[in-house]
Amino acid sequence: MRKRDAGTALATAVAWGGAAAFLICLLVRKVAPYPRWDLLACLAVSAGAVLAWWLRASGRWLPAGGATPAPPRPGPTGRRRLRWWPARRLAYVVLALTAVPLPLVMLFLSTTAATPQLAAILAHHPRISEVAIAEVHHSYLKNSRNYRYYESAVTVTVSPADRPSRGTARLKGTVQTSQLPQLGDRFAGLYAADAPGAGVILDRRAELRALLGGPAGPGDLVMLALYSLFPLSAAAAALRPRAAPHASDGIFGDGEPRMLRVRIVGPGAGNLLRRPTAPGAAKQPGPLLSPSLRLASSHGPRDLFLDRCLDPVSFADTLQGAQGRLYWTPRTEDRPEWSTPALLVLDDGRYVRGTTPIGTPPETPMGEPVSDTHPDPEPTGPVGPYALWQPHVHTPGAICFGAAFLAVVLLVTGVGYDGGVLRTACLVVAAAGPVVGVLMIGPRRTRYLRRLTS
């Protein structure tokens, strides 16, 4: 077990700071010559922070005394963090998965804009001026989900005033319009004054200035803003304050609260079947293989099911032999196979949230009613440290994340800038790597827990 201390928190902040700097560099300078050293520097910062986090989380590098957690305080003094962090894990995972694509979206827009045609124009004397359509070769109507547009191959002319001593130039290019283009329609064009064979790029002036090393244009910002709605919604769900962040929330509900004096004897796993949230619902959630702590009492054993993100082996090793009181509230309509929210408060004041099976007496001890003799618990804080890195669970996911990172590095070094298959493959790996990595963790964790049930 390794504690989520200031070192790991700082490494996390630095890694996300590198990703934010990566996005800002692309917004400030959308297109630049490859390799993009500014982007590579941001990636190096994030990679170094992730490496430091992994070394601390896996226990390979800890400062002196870092492996020993601070002793718990006897009681609440001042402001204290009482939240059970694993309960919010899913919200943070969703936030991370929706925030990571933000710089990837901007990188996609940057790499697709850095075409061989643009490189040919930039190699000479690029300029932006107004051009007029002299000939329309063909037009295609393209439909998308929300809008439609015409993509037309055209020949445009550049005014002699924009080409002193060179006369009128005819340049070929493509233009996207909401209506069929007509002869004489005027657009802003980016071209090379002394290389007409490179053609012309037609777009709004702000978008063309972005191709010359300027900031991202309004079209890119609108696309980025639309996608930002997803991480902003996830952030609102993950970071919103709770009205009553107490350890016993949801434990003492309708019914007679029970208490059982217990001792932690080891790890385990079992099928958790939650109490239905809506009585009479047509479909109730099925059992979920979950980690658990084995508890012993003078009246028999009990299980405390934990959040799936916790490693029961290292968790039980840290708490081996610890004693405390287990609280839960059964209801008259409960079935023996259901589980109900439970709170384990250790004698030193720390707590563990989870669920415990209702069970059938006398096989499962029912404890005793909570009364004035045993008042409601007032824990000082959650049990820690937590197992941050589990090689038997997270290694395949880390490989997928590493492949995605390598794909991004290749993209910012200019691999496949001509729009070939290699660039497409890098974009797919960069976008799908984090998602596949997270999806691979679940089955791997299930196989690990299944070995604990035997």
Image (spheres, rainbow, N blue to C red):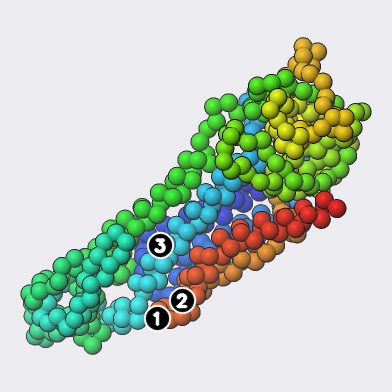
Q: Is residue 5 above or below residue 189?
A: above
SS for callout 3? helix
Q: Residue at x 86, y 43 (%)?
A: 266
Question: Which amino acid type is shown beneath numbered disc 1?
Answer: Asp
Question: Which disc, if any, is residue 137?
Answer: none
SS for callout 2? helix
Q: CA distance from mark 2 to mark 3?
A: 15 Å
Residue 178, position as x, y percentages in the image: 19, 65
In primary-sequence order, the first of circles 1 and 3 is 3
Question: Which disc, if any, is residue 423?
Answer: 2
Question: Which disc, if any, is residue 418?
Answer: 1
Q: Residue at x 82, y 52 (%)?
A: 452
Q: Are marks 2 and 3 in contact (CB under 8 Å)?
A: no
Q: Residue at x 66, y 42 (%)?
A: 86
Observer-nearest residue: 346 or 384?
346
User: Which of the 4 quarters of the picture holds residue 58?
Assistant: bottom right
Residue 260, position as x, y percentages in the image: 83, 26
In primary-sequence order, the first of circles 2 and 3 is 3
Q: Residue at x 61, y 48 (%)?
A: 10
Please state if 195 lies on the left or on the right of 405 as rendered.
left
Q: Are marks 1 and 2 in contact (CB under 8 Å)?
A: yes
Q: Which residue is mark 3?
A: 106
